[in-house]
Amino acid sequence: MDFDLSIKGKCILSAEDNEVNQIVLEHTLAEQDIPFVIVSNGEEAVEGWEALDPLMIFMDISMPVMNGIEAIKAIREKEAVTGKRVPIAALTAHALTGDKERMLEAGADYYLTKPINPNLLLQKIAEIADTGSTRAIL
Ligand SMILES: [Mg+2]
């Protein structure tokens, strides 16, 4: 996949396979001044993370090719040698008991349930900006 490398180190990466959710994400993320990239499976999420060094990642869990859990684990594994840690918020419709724990165990820092709530999404970005690596550009 080709990524716009001019936004490397200063964008939000979002992985989501559902078209309706992609549109919601697009509208919501466009409300702030940070560039964003939406990819549609876990493999592209890992590629995007490697190419773009994003400020944070919103990761859907149920996706084709590679699911969000596998993608999070792959990113955390690769990160282990760099000492860096990108904030990852898992987004999932699964409301089963133990799901949250499964996401966090895989390496997600946050957990948001679907349907996507634009306000909560923006709140999460602000919260991460306050506590994490996005402070500099927000
Ligand atoms: Mg999905």
Image (cartoon, rainbow, N blue to C red):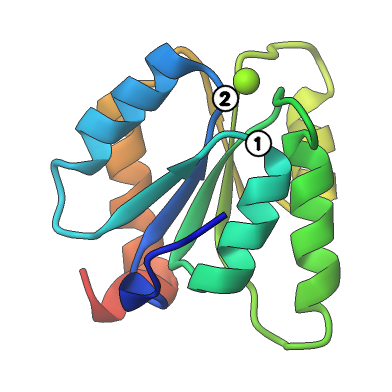
Dots 2 and 1: beta carbons under 8 Å?
yes
Which residue occupies 69% across, 57% down?
Answer: 46
Q: Is residue 136 above or below residue 69?
A: below
Query: x, y (%) of residue 109?
Result: 63, 53
**Amino acid type of the residue tagged 2 in the rendering:** Asp
Q: Quadrant of ligand 1?
A: top right
Query: x, y (%) of residue 93?
Result: 61, 14
In the rendering, which numbered label is found on residue 30?
none
Q: Is residue 137 above or below residue 49?
A: below
Disc 2 within 8 angstroms of ligand 1 (CB): yes
Which residue occupies 43% across, 67% down?
Answer: 55
Reading the image, the residue beneath label 2 is: 17
| In-image side of 84 versus 56 (left or right) | right
**Amino acid type of the residue tagged 1 in the rendering:** Asn
Q: Is residue 137 above or below residue 117?
A: below
Which residue occupies 69% across, 12% down?
Answer: 95
Reading the image, the residue beneath label 1 is: 41
Outermost front residue:
2
Mark 2: few, some, or many residues within 10 Å (few <14, many ≥20)?
some
Mark 1: few, some, or many residues within 10 Å (few <14, many ≥20)?
many
